[in-house]
Image (cartoon, helix red, strand yellow):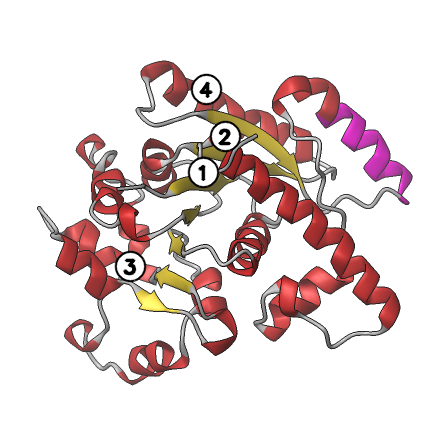
Amino acid sequence: MSQAAIVALLAMKGGVGKTTGTLCLASASRAKGLRTLVVDLDPQRNTTETIINPDYLAAVAAARTRKDLPDMLVDLLEMENPTREDVLRAIHSGSDVWSGVDVLPASLSLASFEQGSPVMVTKLREILALISDLYDVILLDCPPSFLMLTTMAAYAAQIILVIGEPARFGLSGLMDTWKLLARLVEAGLPDLLEAAVIVNLYDQRESDDRVRFKEIAAAFKSIMWADVLFRRVVVGLAIDAGVPLHDYQDQPRYKDKRREEVTTIVDGWLNSILVKTGKKAA
């Protein structure tokens, strides 16, 4: 039975658009009618709260004790040998506007795993192997750090996308992340097909952005994907509205053109992922 393409999006620096990239890819996957699971590894829970259905959020808000909470990712990480049924209980559907996208939700308590034992590195891979046949695409949204949660995601992924922006400290943040990732690659990531850099939040109208973009391109050369996600207001508007980018329409006509520009880029990312993981012919 076919297994999902598993993609980890990571960055050590916060605010570079890692969650934005995850949401945009989830939107692109949904628009293609692909069965999509988003695994939120970030204790900040922004991806979870954007996509997940309101009944889940209401249950979390009403819970008085840990036992009252719905099942979520942290419960699976705490189990010695979770079963397929355990994983399915922890997966929740998206809201109506995100229909077709499921979420394995984050919680603040995930932070306790950041200093976890090295034996934990394969835990997420083992969890996803139990349900990978149910999805076409699985997206792993990592925290802005390179501790155990991100390391688990790297061990589970076929494609790793390191997110950066052409801003002050953008290049150094990418370099730091890549050095840590390179150590894992050298040690051996069992399913990895490609690790690459993608640039987000690029405003080609700004001279500083152009200079810093050239610096990033020179540093990473062949491992940087050519499709760059430009800084566009419409992306933030769609996320603020909690709506998939491909469906967002509450905007003036000129912004609709901007939306099509961005969705074309994100669709290109998704197409590359599907080709590289053998889900689509080149």
Does the magenta portion include 210?
A: yes
Using residue 259 as the reference point, say whether residue 110 is left or right of it. Answer: left
Indicate which label's residue lies in the foreground, 2 or 3.
Answer: 2
Q: Do the residues under discs 1 and 2 have CB atoms within 8 angstroms?
A: no
Where does residue 256 sit, x and y in percent of width and height? 80, 66
Image position of 21 with respect to 182: above or below: below
Report the label total: 4
Residue indicated by mark 2:
276
Q: Position of residue 155 (x, y in %)?
A: 32, 32
Q: Could you give the CA–CA distance between mark 1 and mark 2, rounded to whole angstroms? A: 8 Å
State yes or no: discs 4 and 3 in contact (Cβ < 8 Å): no
Q: Is residue 112 toward the left or the right of residue 280 in the image?
A: left
Residue 94 is one of the magenta-drawn residues: no
Query: Which stretch did the figure color magenta?
Result: 205-216
Kind of residue at disc 3? Ser
Q: Marks 3/1: CA distance?
A: 35 Å
Give 227 or 178, whichever is nearer the viewer.
Answer: 227
- How far apart marks 2 and 4 lie (CA) works out to 20 Å
Pointer 4 residue? 182
Task: Report the Cα–Cα distance between label 4 and label 3.
Answer: 28 Å
Q: Secondary structure at mark 2?
A: helix
Task: Please name the residue that numbered disc 3 is placed on.
Answer: 109
Disc on res. 279 = 1
